């Protein structure tokens, strides 16, 4: 018994040593890289937008940043976070470059965690060129893209999830994208992932105590049961988090929306109305659109990637037209949302019920596998009737009473109801970002969380066997911890960091 206990302790210590050393080296590499940035160079860059503007912000960060304020404004002992209106001068000849606001942020209470200075000056190209040239005379280095944020990461001011949220906030083009990015930049997702990581850490600690001391009866007998209950509950939480229909990722990248229907039903006219410009050629000649016309637009705060397609017909002798139909169907198969357009006049003249005509129409266009078999007709498809301007008042009233969405692209009528219905679909597809229900916004996060879940599943597979080795099982929990650490950057590689920070512009 004592021999087995000694062997077990040797095994667990070997595993712990390997894991700890691997983690230490990873963190040490990062910290060394961070030190090389923060300890030996002071950087500067324009932190506001490019081009002419009323006010531009130039940021300096590093151990010598205060020197910029002292030599260029004659302010020797500035008060932290106080704005000074001063003439900003060239450090060599004393020539006034501009008059602006100067702020001093001593580390670690700054964005980067280092000593920082900001000059807020007029945003003309000549002013900025002279100011940046003057900073270079102090032997400062021009910042690389994302370098300010990278320093904030290495100084533990932000983790990777928050940094990615900040990048998304900078690039957000719609209201809903802004909301999601702001929640992530504020640490909404990080709080959740760190909570899960703490649960795994406690479980590992308890399991190691059980391995080391269970045979000496110095530990509670139900420690394994308690850990397994916690891990089971965590697995359910991660599964629910992953089973979100990729809402956050779709919102971040845009809802891929396709308009399909017969030739000359008004698809290009609808696209032009939604993007508010004549992007697609509109003509009464059937088959005008042959290829996919893809444009981005904002509908009710949701980012939409809108695609006009060739009119779908069952049989065609035209090779180009047949290829256009094939591409339209292939795009529709991968789309997040489908707008199916029908000629309102043809529907009313058919004397069929709406359901009968719709099924006949789908069969006519051979869209059963895309709309019916997949169930997308009910979930992610909006059917609209175009050309209501060709109907008389009586038939129009019949269409309205049926609850069918009717529009006229020619007279631009009926779009309010259409946009209201489309927005409801977009809400379902993208979700509603909130602090209570954070969503995954990056494929990188999803991959690491999936790996984390797989390690937890392996843990339970191992302990379900007879005479299982608790040491090997515990290592799976460590592996799960490591995957969560990769999400937030507590365990990272330079490759992951480079991918994230290269998306930032210079000055951020």
Image (cartoon, rainbow, N blue to C red):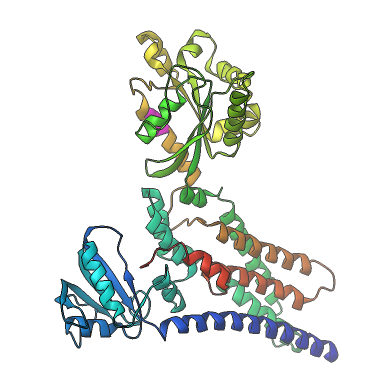
- Residue 75 is left or right of residue 24, and the answer is left
Residue 16: horizontal and vertical position, in percent?
Answer: 69, 83
Q: Residue at x 74, y 73 (%)?
A: 473
Q: Can residue 167 be seen here?
A: yes
Is 243 situated above or below 488? above
- Residue 23 is left or right of residue 281, and the answer is right
Is 381 situated above or below 432? above
Q: Residue at x 61, y 56 (%)?
A: 239
Q: Which residues are magenta?
A: 417-421
Query: Any magenta on residue 420?
Result: yes
Between residue 96 and residue 371, name the one nearer to us. Answer: 96
Q: Quadrant of residue 138?
A: bottom left
Q: Residue at x 46, y 12 (%)?
A: 345
**Which SS does the magenta portion mostly show?**
helix
Query: Any magenta on residue 479?
Result: no
Between residue 205 and residue 308, name the one nearer to us. Answer: 308
Q: Quadrant of residue 303?
A: top left
- Residue 479 is left or right of residue 161, and the answer is right
């Amino acid at each position: 018994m004592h021999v087995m206990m000694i062997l077990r302790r040797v095994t667990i210590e070997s595993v712990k040593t390997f894991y700890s050393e691997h983690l230490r080296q990873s963190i040490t590499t990062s910290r060394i890289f961070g030190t090389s940035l923060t300890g030996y160079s002071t950087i500067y860059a324009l932190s506001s937008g490019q081009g002419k503007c009323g006010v531009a912000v130039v940021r300096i960060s590093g151990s010598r940043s205060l020197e910029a304020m002292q030599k260029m404004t004659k302010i020797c002992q500035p008060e932290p976070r106080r704005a000074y209106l001063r003439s900003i001068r060239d450090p060599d000849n004393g020539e006034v470059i501009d008059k602006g606001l100067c702020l001093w942020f001593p580390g670690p209470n700054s964005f980067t965690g280092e000593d920082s200075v900001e000059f807020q000056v007029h945003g003309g190209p000549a002013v900025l060129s002279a100011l940046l040239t003057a900073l270079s005379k102090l032997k400062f280095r021009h910042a690389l893209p994302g370098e300010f944020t990278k320093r904030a990461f290495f100084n533990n001011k932000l983790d990777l999830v928050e940094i990615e949220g900040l990048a998304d906030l900078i690039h957000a083009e719609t209201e809903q994208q802004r909301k999601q990015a702001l929640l992530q930049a504020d640490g909404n997702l990080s709080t959740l992932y760190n909570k899960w990581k703490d649960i795994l850490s406690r479980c590992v600690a308890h399991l190691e105590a059980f391995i080391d001391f269970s045979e000496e009866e110095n530990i509670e007998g139900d420690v394994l049961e308690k850990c397994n209950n916690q891990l089971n509950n965590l697995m359910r939480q991660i599964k629910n988090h992953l089973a979100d229909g990729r809402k956050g990722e779709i919102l971040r990248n845009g809802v891929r929306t396709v308009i399909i229907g017969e030739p000359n039903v008004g698809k290009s006219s609808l696209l032009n109305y939604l993007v508010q410009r004549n992007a697609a050629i509109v003509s009464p000649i059937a088959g005008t659109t042959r290829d996919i016309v893809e444009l981005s637009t904002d509908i009710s705060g949701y980012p939409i990637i809108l695609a006009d397609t060739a009119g779908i017909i069952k049989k065609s002798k035209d090779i180009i037209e047949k290829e256009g139909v094939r591409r339209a169907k292939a795009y529709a198969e991968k789309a997040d949302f489908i707008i199916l357009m029908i000629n309102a006049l043809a529907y009313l003249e058919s004397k069929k019920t709406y359901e009968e005509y719709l099924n006949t129409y789908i069969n006519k266009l051979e869209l059963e596998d895309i709309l019916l078999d997949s169930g997308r007709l009910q979930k992610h498809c909006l059917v609209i009737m175009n050309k209501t301007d060709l109907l008389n008042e009586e038939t129009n009233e019949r269409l309205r009473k049926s609850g069918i969405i009717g529009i006229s692209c020619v007279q631009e009528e009926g779009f309010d109801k259409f946009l209201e219905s489309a927005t409801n679909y977009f809400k379902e597809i993208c979700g509603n970002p909130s602090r209570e229900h954070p969503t995954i916004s990056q494929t990188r996060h999803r991959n690491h969380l999936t790996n984390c879940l797989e390690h937890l599943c392996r843990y339970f597979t191992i302990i379900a066997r007879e005479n299982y080795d608790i040491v090997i099982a515990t290592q799976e929990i460590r592996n799960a911890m490591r995957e969560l650490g990769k999400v937030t950057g507590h365990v990272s590689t330079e490759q992951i960091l480079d991918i994230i920070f290269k998306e930032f512009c210079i000055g951020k």
